[in-house]
Amino acid sequence: MPAPLRKSGSGLLFSGSDWDFETLSRAHEAIEQVALEELGLDVYPSQLEIITSEQMLDAYASIGLPLMYRHWSFGKHFLYQELLYRKGGRGLAYELVINSNPCIVYLMEENTMALQALVTAHAAFGHNHFFKNNYLFRQWTDAGAILSYMDFAKSYIARCEERHGTDAVEAMLDAAHALMDQGVFRYRRPPKLSSEKQREGVRERLDYEARTYNDLWRTLPPAKAGERLDEAEEKAAERKRALNLPEENILYFLEKNSLILEPWQREILRIVRIVAQYFYPQRQTQVMNEGCATFVHYTVMNTLFDRGRISEGAMLEILRNHSNVVFQPAFDDPRYSGINPYALGLDMMQDIKRIATEPTAEDRDWFPDIAGNGDWRATLLDAWANHRDESFIRQYLSPALIRKWRLFVLGDAAGEAHYEVGPIHNERGYEKVRTALADSYDIGATRANIQVVDVNLLGDRRLRLQHNVKDGVVLDEESRDATLRHIRKLWGYEVSLVGIDLQTGTTVYERSTAQMGE
Amino acid sequence: MPIFIDRRLNPKDKSLGNRQRFLRRAREELKRTIRDRVRSGRISDVDAEHSVSMPARGTDEPRFEEAGDTGRRRHVLPGNREFVPGDRIPKPSQGAASGSKPSRRDSEDDFRFVLSREEVLDLFFEDLELPDMVKLNLKEVLSFKPRRAGFAATGSPTNINVGRTMRNSHGRRIALKRPKARELEALRRELEELEAGRQNEAARARIAALVAELERLERRRRVIAYVDPVDIRFNRFEAQPVPNAKAVMFCLMDVSGSMGEREKDLAKRFFVLLHLFLKRRYDRTEIVFIRHTHEAQEVDEETFFYSTQSGGTVVSTALEEMRRVIDARYPASEWNIYAAQASDGDNFVTDSQRCISLLDEAIMPLCQYFAYVEIIDERESHIFGSTDNGTSLWRAYSTVEDKWPNFQMTRIARAADIYPVFRQLFTKQPAAGRKGG
């Protein structure tokens, strides 16, 4: 028999597994109440769309955006996903959420009502809050404009296909996709879209230079003779300044400076670049984003259950799904495939709640500013707003959690026959394990760092790229050469890539398109 | 209040355009796959879905990726049980690395996907240079004809069966006692008469009763509709395939040593195409394979294409065998008989005359169509291109061609030459009398 309810029976939001729009709406309302009042979330209005499994596959293939331009690689991914799904190798996600305003949430029609409620709490409130409040998303993406921008991009590329032929457009997209990882700004906000503002900026800067011009600087004696740059180097420095080099956003550099591209081709590069930039924050906040959503759905569902709005049967189903999502096998388990961001995120956030409300002496030691402050809601809201995965782990991973997960560091050097166990979950290891885990989520450190360093526009026009090799990790040769060929297509002249070891400054390898055939 | 949008009814194939782009991109490779499939598979299997593996070339998406086996890395792993700092664990041997995730390329390489029948045929037709109309015709699926099959409660408005609907409506009106117009009319008339007549106590009471009654009946009439949605019945149609006659296709081929791999491949494509044509037109098609050297025998498809036999070349034996099979199993009154013969043109000198008489007297009267293809070297095609000179068999068959309009012959050096053989078959399509059923 059901647990005592406040109102007999009618307190339940739903019963049975079937759903209809009225029930969905009622559940949404109840969840909204809990999410906003209890957790203090701040969300975009949500738009819930019911879709079939085929449509979910479609959405997968177009990297999760409801509107996408056409390209063969999406067709390939679709076939791949479809195969996995048909073979039963992989279930489909229950939902898909898009960082837009209003926040679009896709719900699968096959979900039971209990699942729909879970998913609504997870996506329409958890993810939604994170998208709206996290500093990375606020800084780098424009939720209000992405859908209309993709609409523009889709029709623009379709028009280009009509005018210039599918093959030409495809070649351009192929090359641009190869550089997507090198097509984001990591350290500054991308230049504003409006050219009007850009011109204004240039004028202001010139004004400023004119105002602050001081003839005195000219009279300064030159630097010491030994340090003086010879003429060639000075010229190189000069032209690097003019092109704003070094530049890590290779797509941006090619879009602005390529010598052979037509305006429409530049626009295509720009579209790909903007899509890449749009997804950049998501890649840096997997743990936090999923953790936030999971924490929210877990808290909301439990609150609703405590209030007698969800039946025990439904709650059981919800919990079963929840525990599937946050399942984390140990490293030697055959099911292990890396650290599950849902599990890590949820555990860390629940740990923060514990530290804020029931701190141990150790916690007071490690987290003096939040331990025992009692206000876990504010602490979490603050963490969600101001961190990305890397800084979040560096800041909040507690010794208690390291022990619970039994984390340890494993050193893996190529060419050696052994792995070496590094710091483990003990007093001496906590700091180091935490740092190592945080580093592994630092996208700046885990992706190959490749920059445009020099090009002589008046000479041989060779585009020089530099790969800063860290810890001796070099690039896969086959894909590297193929990618360089793509860059050559966009640049029009020879392209060379030099690998420089960051620690020693020595050249690890050198490769130029002149060395390879077409 | 959230906005709900039901997208389930939106068109499904949002990524169809992407799929087409992908297939176009992988076209060459897929074409080769299909060609190999045709070469190694059975003739009748071409006309179906095929599962193919992901083409490796032209569809990879390169990007700068770190090589897995270089440099020094640190992994943070959960679930430590017995390790202490400084422990050394031997690495698993190459290829069996556990815990390392397989690269994207590995996992996508060996997956297969299904090409639809249309896509397979497109690829198959491509270098046969078929005219578009013909392609369309071949891809067309068996035609269906709607046939009445009872009644249904749902359907499109054009299919409403009025008689049924009205009968249901009538029954329902009787069962629910819907007041008839006639009854109402009678009451109204009485009311009018009373109102026109003298107004005494009884009349007034009667009028009030009548008005109340009239109102009740009218309300009842409004509530119980004349035709209610539950009454409506639709004619139900079932798609039934148009009955087609059956056909048998004889494949005759010279398998003596002079027929090499290339010749057999061309011949096979020719047979496949003929089979496709026939399958479109006939409900049931059977294939009979007859191979011959200096003697002929009926064999299965496998033997037909892949086993060799040594011996001279006597074509008439194959024709004899064909006549025997027709007599035994395929009476011309029930079957449409098609024959396709492939040869390199060699024949025993004195045998050609016998072939002519066999065709003239026994076979051509029974056949819907007889196609002879002579597979020649590409260099020879320049010499023989348009002349009547040629092998003894060619010269002999030329006389048959003049006499019988349903006899076609041609020389094939390339795949693109195959189609013209069928042109006449197509122009004749409506006239080709179908027999039996």
Image (cartoon, grey):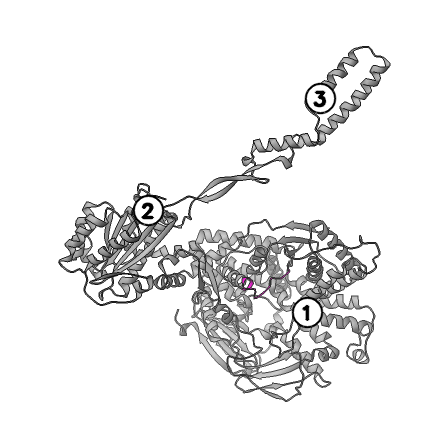
Name the image quarter holding residue B75. Answer: bottom right
Q: Earlier in the sequence, mark 3 or mark 2?
A: 3
Near-viewer residue (A283 or A351): A351
Q: Does dot 3 land on a helix, a strand or a loop? A: helix
- Find the distance from the CA under tag 3 to the CA under tag 1: 74 Å
Could you tell me which secondary element the residue under label 1 belongs to?
loop
Residue extending furthest top? B198
Q: Main secondary structure of the magenta part?
A: loop
| Amino acid bearing label 2 | Glu
Q: Chain of mark 3?
A: B
Pick out the residue farthest to the left: B350
| CA neighbours of label 3 inside 10 A, class few (<14), some (14 to 19), many (20+) | few
Dot 3 and dot 1 residues touching (CB under 8 Å): no
Mark 2 vs mark 1: give the one in front.
2
- Name the residue that disc number 1 marks: A326
Residue B95, percent from left and from top: 50, 79
Q: Which residue, given by chain and number where applicable, does mark 3 sit on? A: B183
Give the residue at x 22% y 63%.
Answer: B293
Chain under label 1?
A: A
- Residue neighbourhood size for the residue with mark 1, other residues' Cα within 10 Å, grouped as few (<14), some (14–19), many (≥20): some
Check disc 1 and give the amino acid type.
Val
Q: Nearer the viewer, mark 3 or mark 2?
A: 2
Is B60 on the left or on the right of B207, as rendered? left
Residue bounds of the magenta highlight: A84-95
As rendered, which of B23 and A319 lies closer to the eye? A319
Q: Is residue A421 magenta?
A: no
